[in-house]
Image (tube, rainbow, N blue to C red):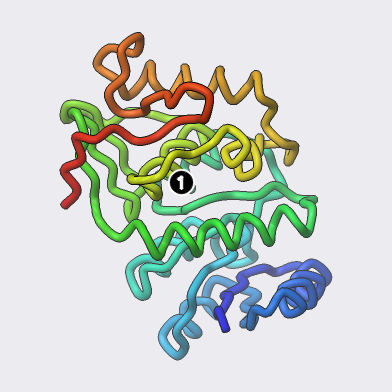
Amino acid sequence: MKQIFLVEDDMTIAKNLTRLLSTEGFTVTHATTQQQAFELLGKQQFDLGLVDISLPDGNGFTVCTEIKEVQDIPVIFLTASGDEASVVTGLNMGGDDYITKPFRPRELVARIKTALRRSEHVSSTVELCGLYVDPAAGIVKKNGGEIQLSALEYRLLMMFVSNPKTILTRDRLLGELWDAAGEFVTNNTLTVYIKRLREKIEDNPSNPEIILTVHGTGYRLGDKDASK
């Protein structure tokens, strides 16, 4: 049974989340403050952190850093704001995903299961055609220089890095990718995000080597893998 570490100061939200996750087969341990979270991290092992960005005695970014240093498990941020800068900051500090309140219960459960699956497959850095990805640190570099990805672009890239030998169908990508408003990404916007991501990570976006198109099916990660 997977152990979820919930760091949330709103008791009503925490109660509802605990009930929801328990019905999905997870065990939930709840902390209401940054200090309490630090104490619990030293006493118990978890599989995933669900962390509110705003806490009464600190913030979720600091908690995420501590979680990564002590246990190195996936972290999903809970935020009441759709502020892109805060989201990207969290991802750059090692967060694996985020979800904006109020959120759909099924969406949250899907995000948690996806993050857990990724953590089982991505445990090392990946280098491919000049691209360097460090999932644990949330760092993406191209030819030695760090590049800035939007939250959704980062999430999209991580799907390919997490499934290096798998063709990702458009239906699967659409099923797992959500925009900041909590809606499904549409077929047209998926094409746009693939294009934007390629423009940032490919040497020649019109002739991609990292994210390849599998005509009539979807996309896959390129073959020139040099995982460390």
The one nearer the camera, 188 or 63, is: 188
Using the image as rendered, state which of residue 10 and residue 141 is in the foreground: 141
188 with respect to 68 (left or right): right
Q: Residue 176 location in percent, x, y?
A: 61, 45
The crowd level at tag 1 (other Cα within 10 Å; few <14, some 14-19, many 20+) is many
Q: Check the image and report above or below for 115 versus 150.
A: below
The residue tagged 1 is: 91
Please provide percent x and percent y for residue 5.
57, 75
Q: Residue at x 53, y 24 (%)?
A: 216
Camera-nearest residue between 31 and 56: 31
Image quarter of residue 45: bottom left
- Residue 92 horizontal/vertical position (percent): 40, 44
Residue 109 sits above or below residue 103 on the image = below
Residue 10 is situated, as x and y percent measured from the top left of the image, at 76, 67
Q: Is residue 23 above or below residue 77?
A: below
Q: Which amino acid is tagged 1?
A: Leu
